[in-house]
Amino acid sequence: MRRSEFYRDADPESRGPLRGLRVVELTTTWAGPMCGSLLADMGADVIKVEHPNGEVARRSPPFLPGTNPPVSFMQATVNRNKRSLSLDLHDARGRDVFRQLVATADIVVENFRPGALEQWGVGWEALRAMRQDLILVSISGYGQYGRDHDRAGYDPLAQAASGYLSLNGDPDGEPVKSPTFIGDDLGGLHAALAALAALHHRDRTGEGQHIDVALLDAMLFQSTGYLTLGAMGAELPRMGNQFRIAAPANTYRCRDGEVMAGILTDAHWKRLAALIDRPELAEDPSYATTAARVARRETVDTLLRTWLSERTVAEAEDAFVAVGLPLAPVRSYAQAAAHPHTADRDMLQPTETEGNAAVPIVGPAAKFSRTPTRVRTGAPALGAHTHEILEELGLSEEERTALARDRVT
C-alpha cells in the first residue's frame, strides 16, 4: 500500500481522534507524562500542571544539541503537543485554581506517591465531589493499595521486582536493566488505554471512576506469560539473544556488523536449509521441526553463524529478504534515525522547540487513516500557557497578576 492510499480519506484539519477531550496532567518524569503524551498526540487538549520551578524532566540530561536555552531530551520527547500551566499546589490559591481547572476536564492524570493528592486536598474523593463523571488516572510504582503501595517506586525497581532483570542479559552475566524506561513506558501505555476504556464506560453510563496503574503490574502483565510459568515452578533460564521457542535465533556477526535473525517456523527452516546450501537438512527429522532444532540449538546456531560470518550485513539482508526470511541489522539509534523507512513512517518530525530550534521529535506510532496524528507543537516552556488557561477559567487580570506576583503561578 502507498502512503497516499492509506491517507486518501484523511481530514486535513485533523488534530487526531481525541479532539475535544480535555486532560489535566499533574505529573513528573516519564510514566505520567507518557500517558499524557499519548492522549495529546491523539488530539486531546492536555494541560500539564507543574510547580513554578518546573519538574525534574526539564533538568534531566542529556540536553538536545543546539538548543538555547538547553532543552532536555525527556522534556522534548514526552511533553510535546501539550499546554503548560505553572501552579503551586502547596498554596491554597493554587489548589483553588486546580479545582477550577479539573471542573473543566474529562480526565486527570497524576503519578505522585499514593496519598500525595489527598495531602493537598485534591484526592479522588474531593475531585469526584466536584464532578461525578470525572476519570482520575493514578500511576505509581506499586499501586494505590497492597502491602507495598506506600513504597517509593521507580522504573528500574519495577524491572527488578517483576522478574524482568533476572532474565535480561547474557546467560553467564549479571542481571541487566532495560536501556529504555520500559516500566514507565508500559505504565503510561496501560494508563492511556485504561483512560479511554473508562471514557467509553462514562459515555454509556455517565459514571466516572478512579484508575489505578502500577508500574510493577504493567511489567508483570507484559511478562510474556513468564509470571504464570514462575508461579508453577517452570525453569526460566536467562538466554541472552536466544529464544526459548525457536532455533536458530540469535544475534550473529557478519563481516562488517551484526544482525538479528531467527527461524520461527518449519517452513522457514526449509528455506534456510536451501539458502545455506544444506538442502538435505530441510526434511531431516533431526532438524525439520522446531522441537528438534531447539534440542540442537548450538548446532543450528553454528550453521547459521558460519554462513553469516562470510557475508556483509547488506549481503545477508538481501539474501534473507529475497526468500522471505526474517533478519534485521543491529543498528545504533543514530543509524535507525537515518534509515529511509524511519522517514517513510514519519517517526521523526521536525518540530520547533524553545528558542526556535528545529528538533527531530519522535512521531506517534499509531497511524489513523481518517484522523491523522502528528507532533503539532514542541514541548512548551514552563508556564507558557498559564495566562491563556487562567483567562479561559475566568480569572480576572488582577487575579492573574496577583498569582504571578506571589509565585503561585
Image: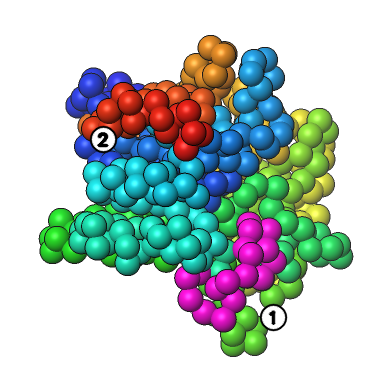
**Farthest right residue in view:** 172
Looking at the image, residue 227 sits to the left or right of residue 172; the answer is: left
The correct choice, above or below, for 92 with respect to 164 in the image is above
**Farthest bottom residue in view:** 232
Q: Is residue 154 magenta?
A: yes
Q: Residues within 10 Å of mark 1 (few under 14, many from 20)?
A: few
Determine the CA span between mark 2 and mark 1. 58 Å
Question: Which residue is pictured at 55% across the width and 73% down the height?
Answer: 149
Colouring convention used in this rendered image of the protein:
rainbow
Location of the N terminus (image quadrant)? top left
Q: Nearer the viewer, residue 108 or 336?
A: 108
Question: Which residue is pictured at 31% across the width and 24% down the height?
Answer: 397
Q: Nearer the viewer, residue 402 or 260?
A: 402
**Image coords of residue 373 (percent x, y):** 34, 31
Q: Is residue 386 magenta?
A: no
**Image coords of residue 343 (percent x, y):** 50, 22
Point out the frontmost of discs 2 and 1.
2
Examine the residues drawn in magenta and state their main secondary structure.
loop
The correct choice, above or below, for 396 with respect to 236 in the image is above
Q: Quadrant of residue 76?
A: top right
Question: Which residue is pictured at 47% across the width and 47% down the height?
Answer: 91
- Give the amino acid type for the residue marked by disc 1 in the picture: Glu
**Image coords of residue 350 (percent x, y):** 50, 18
Q: Nearer the viewer, residue 21 or 177?
A: 21
Which residue is identified by label 2?
Answer: 393
User: Is disc 2 placed on a helix, strand or loop?
Assistant: loop
Tell me if residue 78 can be seen. Answer: no
Q: Which residues are magenta?
A: 143-161
- Give the amino acid type for the residue marked by disc 2 in the picture: Leu
Q: Nearer the viewer, residue 268 or 226?
A: 226
Which residue is identified by label 1?
Answer: 235
